[in-house]
Amino acid sequence: MSVARRQRTLARPVTVTGFGYYSGRDIQVEFWPASEYTGITFVRHDLGPQARIPASAALRVDMPRRTTLELNGARVEMVEHVLAALAGLRVDNCEVWVDAAEMPGCDGSAQAFVEAIDAAGVVEQRSPVPQIVVRQTVRVGGSDRWIEAQPSRSAGLSVTYDLDYSSHKAIGRQTYGIDVTPDSFRRELASCRTFITEDVAQGMLAEGRGQRVTPRDLLIFGAHGPVDNSLRFADECARHKLLDVVGDLALAGCEIIGHVVAYRCGHQLNTELAKRLLEQAEAYDGRFGFMAQRRCA
Ligand SMILES: [Zn+2]
């Protein structure tokens, strides 16, 4: 049985600016240090300081292609890359102050958030981090797309993602797996960008969305590969989907110790797994419920 590491927060506040892909709206994201056991909390200060939205799987509302959280009418959208950066770098407690709903797309990856967190620095707090240790396999989804968490002998989180775009030859089938640590996250995952196919991109433009986005701002796949852009890794798409898994699983509000295997899944199933893991942890250990409650709204 491993001893949990200590909780961590930022050493000082830091800011990232950009615009939302869907809305086209400018946004300023301020990352602030936060107390132990408070977890990650988004604050929509444009709506008032009471508009606080804890990063909890229970608050997910269904929107296509992104993770959106809502509490008492206050909403934050496309939070998955912000959460991935925080989880990847093991920042457990942080207030994320924003002045609009949709997080900045930046270059489609988590790189800008990672650079900001690294510039701020991370400090250890006093108490051990709440952990969910996967004790039996939990699986959600059907035969065509699923994600499961398995017990692991390692002391951390490992993830394998199997991306199957057989119908789109330029993407194809890619599998990528990694032990998620701050070093591996920075090196192998942070810069991997979100991607869409050209026909989906055209559909969005026709609906009046994504007007400020250019093919340089993310990966748009045509028949022969990325349009007006080039890959950072041959399997960048699978790595990005893995990054999304890391971000969505952070909605459990606790560090997850286990091996996660994912096949063709997206934000909805990732979040469902986070919920199920919390339920399993609470069923196994009643004391856990108390700890989790303090973090997971
Ligand atoms: Zn993503």
Image (cartoon, rainbow, N blue to C red):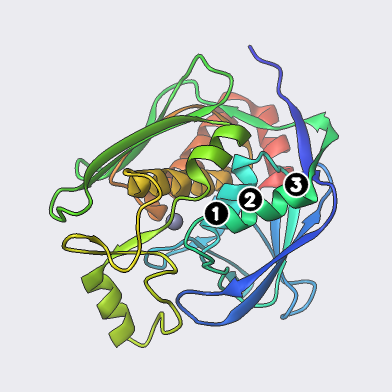
Residue 111 falls left or right of residue 116: left
Pick the residue in front: 145 or 30. 30
Cβ–Cβ below 8 Å for labels 1 and 2?
Answer: yes
Front-most of residues 187 and 14: 187
Identify residue type, mark 2. Answer: Val
Q: Where is residue 136? Give x, y as percent.
A: 43, 22
How many numbered dots are placed on residues in this image? Answer: 3
Foreground disc of the pair 2, 3: 2
* SS category of the residue bearing label 1: loop
For label 3, the crowd category at 10 Å Cα-Cα, with few meaning under 14, some 14 to 19 and many 20 or more, is many
Left or right side of 188 for 104: right
Which amino acid type is shown beneath numbered disc 1?
Ala
| Image height of 48 relative to 229, above or below | below
Q: Which residue is mark 2?
A: 114
* Residue 126 vs residue 276, the one in the foreground: 126
Crowd around label 1: few <14 · some 14–19 · many ≥20 (10 Å): many
Residue 261 visible to an observer of this rendering: no
Quadrant containing the N terminus is: top right
Say which element carries label 3.
loop
Name the residue located 39 percent from the left edge and 82 percent from the top edge: 209
Q: Which residue is mark 1?
A: 110
> Pointers 3 and 1 in contact (CB under 8 A)?
no
